Each structure stands twice: as structure tokens, then as C-alpha cells.
Amino acid sequence: MTMTALGVMTAILADPENLDHVRSLVTPDVTYVSLNYDNPDLKRVMPWCGTSYGPEAIVQTFVDVGRYWRIDDFQVEAELDDGEKAAIFGRFTYTSMVLSQTVTSPFVVLGRVKDGICHHMQFMEDTFATTASFRSGGHWMIRSNPGGDQIEV
């Protein structure tokens, strides 16, 4: 029996560092989008960011996340499945390995599945928060509010 889209995505997240496992659930050319489509500055901070292809990209992301942070908590809060797409929403708490800074972020994983095999996976989180767990100094001057003042972060 073919797994549902949600079943495939849940199975991937159950053992995302195991290449044979992930390979059995995705197409050889699966598109994997981690946090953004293409942001060179963010990629310098988190090398797995952006669009990549193949099961190796998914596995390497989760291996690297485990190298950069200690995963303190990972909670699924909601799941949706419409047949060919599934989304898993939740929250995680990570502590950065180098600076021991802890952050909690919402996340969503979107999967596009056909005939029980994932061909597109996208992982989103609060990258402002997770990147800040690596912040060792300095500040940003930000002007986002058209009617407001500049703020320092």
C-alpha cells in the first residue's frame, strides 16, 4: 500500500540523517529548499540554506543542524494532508554548540508527494532567531517602519 503524503513526510523526519532511509522515500532528484531559495549571506552562516537536489542534500542538512546546534526539543503541533501535499507545523528549541545560546522557533515542513514518493521538500523556520543563536557581537541598525525611527538590534 502506498503511503500518504503525510506518512512520507513523517517518515522522513523520523530518521532524516539516514541516507538509505531518506533515499527510499524521495525521488533521486528531489528538490529540497532549506529556509530560502537563495541567500548568499545566510548560506555563509548556515551552509545548507537554499535550494538543492537529491536525498543527500536533505540528509546533509539534518547532519549539519546537529553539528551546529544541540536539539533540545522538537514538537509537532499540527499536520495537514491534501493527498499530494502535506505540511507539518511545530516548534523546536536549539542551543548553539559554539556560543551555547538557546532559541525557540516555529517551523513548517512542506512536502509534495506523488505515488508515495516525495519529489519536493521545503523546511522553514524563524531564521532571524536561529541565526541570532550564533551572534557573537555587533549590531544592526534597522529602518522597517515607514513612520518610525531607526532601531538597533
Image: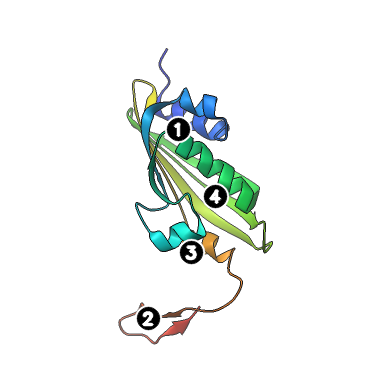
Give the CA distance from mark 4 to mark 1: 24 Å
- The residue depicted at 64 percent of the width and 58 percent of the height is 96
Give the CA distance from mark 3 to mark 4: 15 Å
Give the mark nearest the N terminus, 2 or 1.
1
Q: Is residue 109 left or right of residue 13?
A: left
Name the disc covering residue 55, or none: 1
Which numbered disc, 3 or 4, marks the residue closer to the eye? 3
- The residue depicted at 52 percent of the width and 62 percent of the height is 131
Name the disc covering residue 128, or none: 3
Task: Classify 10 Å Cα crowding around label 1: few (below 14), some (14-19), many (20 and above).
Answer: many
Q: Is label 4 in a helix, a strand or a loop?
A: strand
Name the disc covering residue 91, or none: 4
Give the CA distance from mark 1 to mark 3: 27 Å
Q: Is label 3 in a helix, a strand or a loop?
A: helix
List x then y, in percent, for residue 22.
Answer: 50, 28
Provide the residue designation for mark 2.
143
Q: Is label 2 in a helix, a strand or a loop?
A: loop
Say whether residue 119 is visible.
no
- Image quarter of the N terminus: top left
Amino acid type, residue under disc 1 in the picture? Pro
Say whether residue 35 is visible.
yes
